[in-house]
Amino acid sequence: ALFFARKVGRMLEVQREEAGSTQVYRVRGQVFFASAGQLGAAFDYQHVAPKVQIDLRDAHLWDLTAVAALERAQEKLAAHGAEVTVVGLNAASRTLIEQVGGRGGGH
């Protein structure tokens, strides 16, 4: 199980793009307990644009740890003054967020 977690944990990629006053973080891959820390570390909390978009179109949230990592990132970015939006959640990820009472699709 640990080997699986390490292997899948490397299957997450986050790319940052600048678009005017907006930073777009494109997340690709599987977000779960083994990769959630990698997701949180991918955001630049020191240089935050007024607007930040987290694009999850090519990602899937698998568990509570993934939802918590996304929410922590949103909260930290907002604490640095960003208006944060999450786009591209697939149906299963959105359902998971709703089940745990998260705000993953929020601003």
Image (cartoon, grey):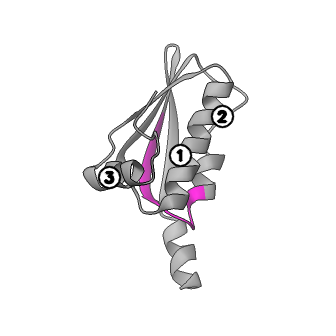
Identity of the residue drawn at 66% across and 48% down:
41
Q: Is residue 1 left or right of residue 45?
A: left
Res. 95 mark:
3
Q: Mark 3 touching mark 2, by CB under 8 A? A: no
Identity of the residue drawn at 49% across and 71% down:
8
- Which three-letter amino acid code belongs to the residue tagged 1? Leu
The vertical placement of 78 against 96, above or below, is above
Res. 70 mark:
1
Identity of the residue drawn at 26% across and 50% down:
91
First-in-chain label (3 vs 2): 2
Q: Residues within 10 Å of mark 3 (few under 14, many from 20)?
A: some
- Which three-letter amino acid code belongs to the residue tagged 3? Thr
First-in-chain label (2 vs 1): 1
Q: Nearer the viewer, residue 96 or 49?
A: 96
Q: Residue 88 sits in which quadrant? A: top left
**Residue position marked by numbered label 2 in the rendering:** 76
First-in-chain label (3 vs 1): 1
Task: Give the structural element (helix, strand or loop) at label 2.
Answer: helix
